[in-house]
Amino acid sequence: MISLEAIKKVIQPTLEEYNLYLVDMHAGNGNNFKIEVDSLEGFKIEHCVKINRAVEAVFDRDVEDYALEVTSPGLDQPFKVPQQYHKNIGREVELVLSNGEKRVGTLKEVSETGITIEKTERKKIEGTKKKEWVTTTSVFEFKEIGKAFVKLSF
């Protein structure tokens, strides 16, 4: 039986060669494996092929009888690793905080401990009758964030 650690060890050189990072990997029923990989420079189908071939070069499908799916994380999936925050700087994100609150804003900065988002909206200014554009900046530590997603706009 193939272990996740064995697969991780096999794909590591390929990840490094193509500047990819591992987002998630898990084993399903039997020997069914799913590997989610991404890149700060953009993920290509060729990357999936290279990773798949690296695994097949070490583990013979006829002997091990396994299924392997290599994919990039879906846009509707929450961020799982810090690199995903870096990749999405400048994009609108939706945060679900640990306390259940939701926040939306443009991801401006990522540090070792958290992120900074900005939101610009029209607000009524006290003492005036009209609304003005106001930009607010919020800082969240990673431990405060339950889930973070890219906010999709159609």
Image (cartoon, helix red, strand yellow):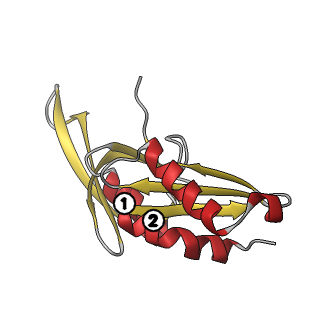
Q: Amino acid at mark 1?
A: Tyr
Q: Which residue is mark 1?
A: 18
**Does 31 sit left or right of 83 as displayed?**
right
Point 85% across, 60% down: residue: 30
* Numbered disc 1: secondary structure: loop
Residue 73 shown left or right of residue 32 in the figure: left
- C-alpha distance separating marks 2 and 1: 6 Å
Near mark 2 (Cα within 10 A), the count class, few <14, some 14-19 or many ≥20, is some
Is 84 on the left or on the right of 147, as rendered? left
Q: Residue placed at 41% from the left, 57% from the top?
A: 84
Q: Residue at x 36, y 74 (%)?
A: 113
Instruction: Indicate the position of residue 131 as horizontal and vertical percent values.
Output: 19, 28
Place residue 68 in its image quadrant: bottom right
Residue 129, given in percent of the width and then of the height, sits at 17, 26
Q: Quadrant of the C terminus?
A: top left
Vertical arrangement, residue 13 with respect to residue 87, above or below: below
Q: Which mark is residue 6?
A: none
Is label 2 in a helix, a strand or a loop? helix
Badge 2 vs badge 1, beta-carbon distance below 8 Å: yes
Quarter of the figure with residue 38: bottom left
Disc 2 target residue:
14
> Which amino acid, mark 2?
Thr
Q: How many marks are shown on the rendered structure?
A: 2
Would residue 95 be seen by someone viewing this image from the given angle? no
Front in this rendered view, residue 118 or 90:
90
Q: Residues within 10 Å of mark 1 (few under 14, many from 20)?
A: few
For this orientation, the residue located farthest to the top is 154
Using the image as rendered, state which of residue 102 and residue 43 is in the foreground: 43
